[in-house]
Image (spheres, rainbow, N blue to C red):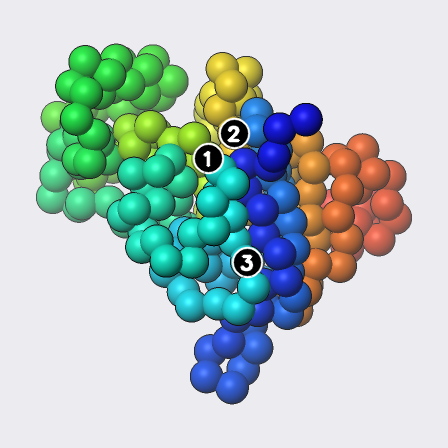
Amino acid sequence: MSDPLLEVEDLDVYYGKSQALDGVSLTVERGEIGGIIGPNGAGKTTLLDAVAGFLDYDGTIRFNGRDVADLDPQQLVTDGLVYCTEDRDLFPFFSVHENLRMGAQFREDRDAVRADLDMVYDLFPRLDDRRDQEAQTMSGGEQQMLAVGRALMGDPELLVLDEPTLGLAPVIIDDISDAIETLNEQGQTLLLVEQNATFALRHAHRLSLLESGRVELSGSATAFRDNDYITEAYVGIH
């Protein structure tokens, strides 16, 4: 078996004297969808910020077998770790097409970029219909599609999605769901972080439960679905 694409071992993160993550460990295997669930304030975004190179930490993070402690976020993107944040970070006055092109700014193979543009427009036809529209004038759901599309333009080996369904209407959540399934069927590895446990359980192959900065449970999606605490606390099945 090949090494995991992402390995996090004994990760500690502090904000001043306050400890946000305490000994967090997890792996994401190549070709799978890894999931992280947990309540607000559990440390989910802090974990992703550390993985993506935005925070100092104690412990070890390896991507593609390489310790990334000395790599900055741009280097990680170039190496294939692309992070779609909860805030989306779009260029509001740029068009859909311009935002997507910005996602490929570090790539040199123009033919591959054009092919990926076509792929994103096929994945999200709404973006194709609005390719000349300014990002700031789009609905929240359309902006989320654009954020995911722009991340894909970075040619990720690992696509990290932070709360991709937050605040979205059910019809848009279905579109995001279909896109995640299609991408994974095409071989894309994903790390999906969600407060919406139902959505995460629908897609992830393996999950970790993060509470108060610690991983309290890890296992297969089946094991999570069969766990009474998970279903009662996070899925609402009583």
Mark sitting earlier along the chain (1/3)? 3
Give me the C-alpha separation between circle 2 and circle 1. Answer: 5 Å
Q: Which mark is residue 189?
A: 2
**Mark 3 lies on residue:** 60
Say if mark 2 contacts mark 1, CB within 8 Å: yes
129 sits left or right of 76 in the view = left
**Mark 1 lies on residue:** 158
Considering depth in this image, is 75 or 215 the residue closer to the camera? 75
The answer to whether any part of residue 142 appears in the image is no
Residue at left offset 77%, top offset 42%: 219
Give me the C-alpha separation between circle 3 and circle 2. Answer: 20 Å
Considering depth in this image, is 73 or 33 the residue closer to the camera? 73
Residue 91: percent from the left, percent from the top?
18, 45
Considering depth in this image, is 80 or 3 the residue closer to the camera? 3
Residue at left offset 75%, top offset 35%: 221
Considering depth in this image, is 119 or 50 the residue closer to the camera? 50
- Foreground mark, 1 or 3, reads 3
Residue at left offset 29%, top offset 46%: 75
Residue at left offset 55%, top offset 58%: 60
82 sits left or right of 118 in the view = right
- Name above or below for residue 108 compared with residue 141: above
- Foreground mark, 3 or 2, reads 3
The amino acid beneath tag 1 is: Leu
The amino acid beneath tag 2 is: Thr
- Name above or below for residue 102 compared with residue 56: above
Residues packed near mark 1 inside 10 Å, few (<14), some (14 to 19) or many (20 plus): many
Q: Which mark is residue 56?
A: none
Task: Give SS at disc 2.
Answer: strand
Mark sitting earlier along the chain (3/2)? 3
80 sits left or right of 185 in the view = left
